[in-house]
Amino acid sequence: MDFDKLVHQPTRLQIFAYLYRHGESSFTDLTSALDLTEGNLSSHLQRMEDAGAVEITKAFVDDRPQTSAALTDEGREQFEEHVHTLQALIDDLE
């Protein structure tokens, strides 16, 4: 079985799972919920955005910059395929 290296990396897997469950989330919410540094989160999100898995949105809310991230349709599919691969691996062990 081949794992998608973009999704399988532990920190990115957490980001995929969080965004899959919660939908669009602010950068602040992601750093807090996943206990990541801003730099670490930023580099992983950039990698995911470059691969077409997430869409990053930058806006001003109450005159303050706010960055948020959401899985693209492709990102949702990548995550679902990864989950199916893991499930197949578990099923093969039974």
Image (cartoon, grey):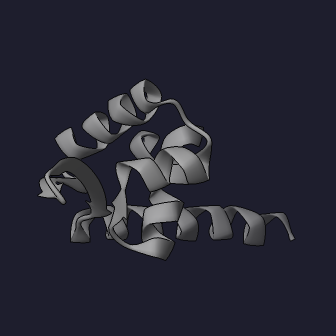
Residue that appears at 18% across and 59% down: 62
Residue that appears at 53% across and 50% down: 13
Relative depth, front residue between 83 and 72: 72
Q: How far across and down, in percent of the image, does residue 50 sit?
A: 18, 39
Q: How many numbered circles does the render carry?
A: 0
Relative depth, front residue between 57 and 9: 57
- In the image, 29: left or right of 69? right
- Residue at the far top in the pictured view: 39
In which quarter of the view is residue 70 placed? bottom left
Q: Is residue 58 above or below residue 88?
A: above
Q: Is residue 66 above or below residue 36?
A: below
Q: Is residue 3 visible?
A: no
Q: Is residue 15 visible?
A: yes
- In the image, 38: left or right of 92? left
Q: How far across and down, in percent of the image, does residue 37 sit?
A: 51, 30
Residue that appears at 42% across and 49% down: 28
Relative depth, front residue between 12 and 1: 12
In which quarter of the view is residue 43 placed? top left
Q: How far across and down, in percent of the image, does residue 6 sit?
A: 40, 42
Q: How far across and down, in percent of the image, does residue 3 sit?
A: 51, 47
Residue that appears at 66% across and 70% down: 87
- Residue at the far right in the pictured view: 94
Q: Quadrant of the C terminus?
A: bottom right
Q: Is residue 17 above or below residue 37?
A: below
- In the image, 16: left or right of 1? left
Q: Is residue 46 above or below residue 31?
A: above
